[in-house]
C-alpha cells in the first residue's frame, strides 16, 4: 500500500529530476507558463527558486506577493501534481550564487548582475499528487481480474508540503 509519505517522496524526487512546471497566479485568468524550478540541495526544507525576468508578465503579476499554482508532470508520466503556495520576488544574492549554472546563465547577458534578472521564491504548501502505474503493468493486472479503481485508490493523495523535507 502506498502511503502519503511515499507519494510525497516520489513527488519531490520527480520534481528534482525533471524541474519543469507550469506556474501561474492562483485564481488568475492569465495562463500559467513553463518555468524551471531550482531546488537548493544545501537545504532540503528550502522553497523552490525560479529565475525569471523583471519584465515578464508573471513577475509583474506577483508584485508584492501572490498565491501561486503550479502543475507538474514528470518526464515518464509516472507522477502528476498540482500544488499551491506563496510566490514572492526575492533576489537573495546568496541563493543566486548557489543556484547559478550554465543553463540559467544562457538567459542573462549581464550574468548574475543582469538588471532584468528576477528570482522568484515559491513556497509550496499543499499538493494533490497522482502516481501513474505503467499502463502495460496495469493492463496485465486487469487481465487477471484486478479492479482498476481499487488498484488506483492509493495512488493519489492530498499532500502537505509545508515544512516537509525533501529527500536528498
Image (cartoon, helix red, strand yellow):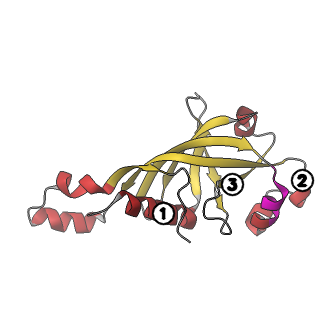
Local SS, label 3: strand
Q: Quadrant of residue 44?
A: bottom right
Question: For this rendering, which residue is in front, 94 or 115?
Answer: 94
Tell me the mark number nearer the camera, choosing from 3 and 1: 3
The span from disc 1 to disc 2 (Cα, nearest Å) is 31 Å
Q: Which of marks 3 and 1 is nearer the N terminus?
A: 3
Q: Mark 1 points at which residue?
A: 75
Q: Which quadrant, please, contains the C terminus?
A: bottom right
Please tell me whether residue 161 is drawn above or below residue 11 in the rendered image: above
Q: Mark 3 points at which residue?
A: 49
Tell me the mark number nearer the camera, choosing from 2 and 3: 3
In this orientation, does residue 122 appear? yes
Residue projecting furthest to the front = 163
Q: Which of marks 1 and 2 is nearer the N terminus?
A: 1
* Residue range of the region highlighted in magenta in the rendering: 91-97
In this orientation, does residue 78 appear? no
Q: Is residue 62 magenta?
A: no
Q: Please, what is the dominant secondary structure of the magenta stretch?
A: helix
Q: Residues within 10 Å of mark 1 (few under 14, many from 20)?
A: some
Question: For this rendering, which residue is in front, 35 or 63?
Answer: 63
Q: Which of marks 2 and 3 is nearer the N terminus?
A: 3
The span from disc 2 to disc 3 (Cα, nearest Å) is 17 Å
Q: In which quarter of the image is residue 41?
A: bottom right
Q: How crowded is mark 2: few (under 14 residues within 10 Å), some or many (20 or more)?
A: few
x and y, in percent, of residue 53 in the image: 79, 46
The residue drawn where x is 49% and y is 45% is 126
Amino acid at each position: 500500500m502506498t502511503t502519503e509519505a511515499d507519494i510525497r517522496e516520489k513527488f519531490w524526487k520527480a520534481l528534482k529530476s525533471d524541474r519543469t512546471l507550469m506556474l501561474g497566479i492562483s485564481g488568475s485568468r492569465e495562463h500559467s507558463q513553463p518555468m524551471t524550478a531550482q531546488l537548493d540541495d544545501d537545504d532540503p526544507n528550502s522553497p523552490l527558486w525560479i529565475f525569471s525576468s523583471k519584465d515578464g508578465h508573471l513577475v509583474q503579476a506577483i508584485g508584492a506577493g501572490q498565491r501561486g499554482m503550479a502543475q507538474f508532470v514528470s518526464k515518464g508520466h509516472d507522477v502528476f501534481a498540482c500544488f499551491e503556495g506563496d510566490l514572492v520576488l526575492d533576489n537573495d544574492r546568496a541563493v543566486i550564487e548557489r543556484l547559478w549554472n550554465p543553463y540559467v546563465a544562457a538567459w542573462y547577458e549581464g550574468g548574475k548582475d543582469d538588471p532584468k534578472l528576477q528570482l522568484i521564491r515559491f513556497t509550496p504548501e499543499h499538493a494533490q499528487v497522482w502516481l501513474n502505474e505503467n499502463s502495460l503493468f496495469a493492463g496485465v493486472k486487469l487481465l487477471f481480474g484486478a479492479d482498476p479503481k481499487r488498484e488506483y485508490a492509493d495512488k493519489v493523495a492530498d499532500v502537505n508540503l509545508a515544512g516537509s523535507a525533501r529527500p536528498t
